[in-house]
Image (cartoon, helix red, strand yellow):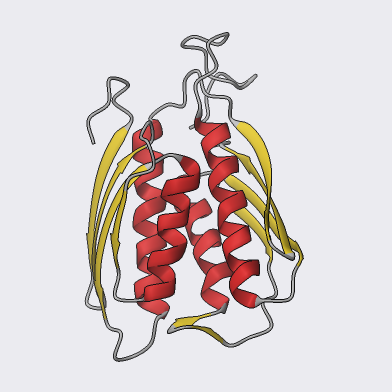
Amino acid sequence: MESDSGRRARIERETRETKVRVDLNIDGTGIANVQTGIGFLDHLLTTVARHGLFDLSIETIGDLAVDSHHTAEDTAIALGRAFDQALGDRRGIVRIAHAYAPLDEALALAVVDISGRGHAEIDAPLGVPMLGTLDADMVRHMLASFAIEARLTLHARVLAGVNAHHRAEALFKAFARALDAATRRDPRLGDIVPSTKGTLG
């Protein structure tokens, strides 16, 4: 996970409910090693790495005997904190980007502003209670938790689709591609923070 840019982070978070370790390289090639104990969650997070071109290693041990909520939520919190740490003061980044992503009949849109302010508007009805062993509402809740901890604004919406798996995966693909585009360095900016305020803190 080495990179000349140095935009890397390791986050370790432990509570009575979960133990999470995240290693992130923003300037990666899409290498993913995700183990949360929830197959569909692993699938979604691997999708983020592959389509965002982030190198990502996640290991979560959670109270799955209860349900998927704490494991998914705490993983999203740790991942958001990793992005916040790796981005530092946000100098020279594009900052605002959007992406559409289709998956067969499904279509999703995500818009990201790495603003320094955590906020999320997620419209992602999936029409099923579970996706494998993942509570389907965690798709929405994870993205919101990530946005708050990463200190960015995220608008994400499922625009079309019938199959719940396709709708969720299209949403995470759009999210990954928008996040990749927003975190890229703009050579025209150099070390300038892309804000009229001079800070994205």
Residue nearer the viewer, 51 or 57: 51
Q: Residue at x 57, y 8 (%)?
A: 188
Give the side of residue 119 with respect to residue 43, left or right.
right
In the displayed orientation, state which residue is furthest to the right: 160
Q: Residue at x 62, y 56 (%)?
A: 120
Q: Quadrant of residue 125?
A: bottom right
Q: Residue at x 56, y 37 (%)?
A: 114
Total numbered labels placed on residues in the image:
0
- Name the image quarter holding the N terminus: top left
Give the side of residue 93 with respect to residue 102, left or right.
left
In the displayed orientation, state which residue is furthest to the front: 104
Instruction: Work out whether 77 lies above or below 192.
Output: below
Give the side of residue 13 with respect to residue 31, left or right.
left
What percent of the width, then of the height, locates residue 19? 21, 68
Instruction: Work out whether 89 lies above or below 54.
Output: above
Instruction: Work out whether 99 lies above or below 63.
Output: above
Residue nearer the viewer, 91 or 60: 60
What percent of the width, then of the height, locates residue 23? 26, 47
Q: Residue at x 64, y 76 (%)?
A: 164
Q: Quadrant of residue 88?
A: top left
